[in-house]
Amino acid sequence: YEERMLPFSLSRGCVRGCLFCIDRKIFSHYQSRPAEMVVQEIKHHYYKYGITRFRSHDLLINGDLKNLERFAELLIKEKIKITWDCQAICREMPLTLFYKLKKSGLGAILFGVESASNKVLKRMNKMHTAEIAQRNIRYAKLMGIEVIINILVGLPGEEEEDFIETMKFIEKNKDYLH
């Protein structure tokens, strides 16, 4: 038996301009869909077809934190038993938001960490620090959300000590990663 899963989109595009990414050129600006509309779509598939597993196809679920929080609150209010997963950028997010995300059914989150060297992150134009990434990882895990991270190695200008910083970061956070 294989569980049926459907994609959904809360947004399109990205709020960042990472050096290595082409998505910004494909989607010239970030657009967020109303949380109410997305929850209605999920409810339709839940009640009509019994779908309980969903995957966000957003490049980043957390481009608009207010809309993401509204999305989680609406799912909680509807009391439907679903699980969903997503991709996210590393950015300041309160622990209370991670709590709501878990309560709404978020099972796994993939963070675009890319590096734990702040020098390399700045060069990538990532707009977060290794400290913010670590906080996101730990908050998510604390709430019972599986955490996956992307790591990018070999950016021109990355030096051995930058790579070692990233390896130490992974070692330090291994108990928080799925």
Image (tube, rainbow, N blue to C red):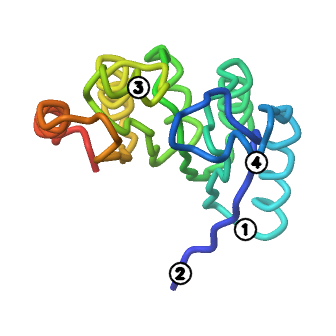
- Residue 154 to residue 168: above or below: below
Which label number is shown at residue 73?
Answer: none
Q: Secondary structure at mark 2?
A: loop
2 or 4: tag closer to the N-terminus: 2
For mark 4, what is the residue? 26
Say which quarter of the image contains residue 44.
bottom right
The residue sitting at 80% across, 51% down in the picture is 43
Q: Is residue 73 left or right of residue 133?
A: right
> Separation of disc 2 and disc 1 at Cα?
13 Å
> How many C-alpha atoms fall within 10 Å of the one at disc 1: few (<14), some, or many (≥20)?
few
For mark 1, what is the residue? 50
Q: Choose mark 2 or mark 3, whichever is in front.
A: 3
> Separation of disc 3 and disc 4 at Cα?
22 Å
Rendered location of residue 143, percent (x, y): 38, 31
Q: Mark 2 and mark 4 in contact? Answer it, CB < 8 Å.
A: no
Amino acid type at mark 2: Glu
2 or 1: tag closer to the N-terminus: 2
> Separation of disc 2 and disc 4 at Cα?
33 Å
Amino acid type at mark 1: Gly
Q: Mark 2 and mark 1 in contact? Answer it, CB < 8 Å.
A: no
The residue sitting at 61% across, 61% down in the picture is 53
Q: Secondary structure at mark 1?
A: loop
The residue sitting at 35% across, 42% down in the picture is 155
> Separation of disc 4 and disc 1 at Cα?
34 Å
Nearer to the camera, 85 or 169? 169
> Separation of disc 2 and disc 3 at Cα?
43 Å
